[in-house]
Image (cartoon, rainbow, N blue to C red):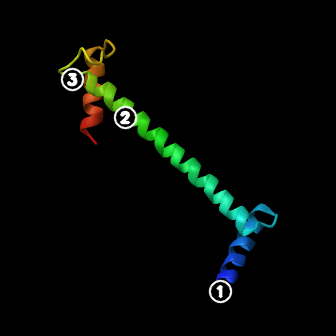
Amino acid sequence: MQDDLNTYKVCVTMSSLTKKPLTLIALQNTFEVFCNLLVSRIHFRYHEQLERLKNSYALFDPNKDVRTPQDIIDSQRKAVIIAYSCR
C-alpha cells in the first residue's frame, strides 16, 4: 500500500510538470532513456579527454616513431605543460 502511494506521488508530481498523466512504465522508460544519455555523454567525454592526453603526451614520448605529433611551437608546448601541471 505504501509503495502504491509513493508511486502515485511521483506520478502526480511528474504529471504536474508535463501536464499529462504518467504511468510507472512511462517513468521507467523515461528514466532509462535519461540513464542511456548520461552514459553516452560520460563515455564521449572520457574519450575526448583520452585523446587530449595522448596528443599532449606525444610531445614528450620517447618512442616518437609510434605516434607522430603535429609540429608545434614552443609557446604551444609551454601551454600544454601549464594546462596539465595545474590539475
- 15 left or right of 74? right
Q: Nearer the viewer, residue 17 or 55?
A: 55
Q: Position of residue 24 (x, y in %)?
A: 71, 69
* Residue with the most extreme right position: 20
Instruction: Work out whether 47 lies above or below 3.
Output: above
Which residue shows up at 69% across the image and 83% down it? 5
The three-letter code of the residue at mark 1 reads Gln
- 42 left or right of 20? left
- 85 left or right of 24? left
Q: Are marks 3 and 2 in contact (CB under 8 Å)?
A: no
Q: Earlier in the sequence, mark 2 or mark 1?
A: 1
Q: Residues within 10 Å of mark 3 (few under 14, many from 20)?
A: few
Secondary structure under tag 1 reads helix
Which residue shows up at 57% across the image and 50% down it? 36
Alpha carbons under labels 2 and 1: distance apart: 47 Å
Secondary structure under tag 2 reads helix
Q: Residues within 10 Å of mark 1 (few under 14, many from 20)?
A: few
Q: Position of residue 33 (x, y in %)?
A: 63, 52
Q: Position of residue 80 (x, y in %)?
A: 29, 28
The three-letter code of the residue at mark 3 reads Phe
The three-letter code of the residue at mark 2 reads Leu
Q: Residues within 10 Å of mark 2 (few under 14, many from 20)?
A: few
Instruction: Work out whether 32 lies above or below 51.
Output: below
Residue 50 marker: 2
Q: Which residue is mark 3?
A: 60
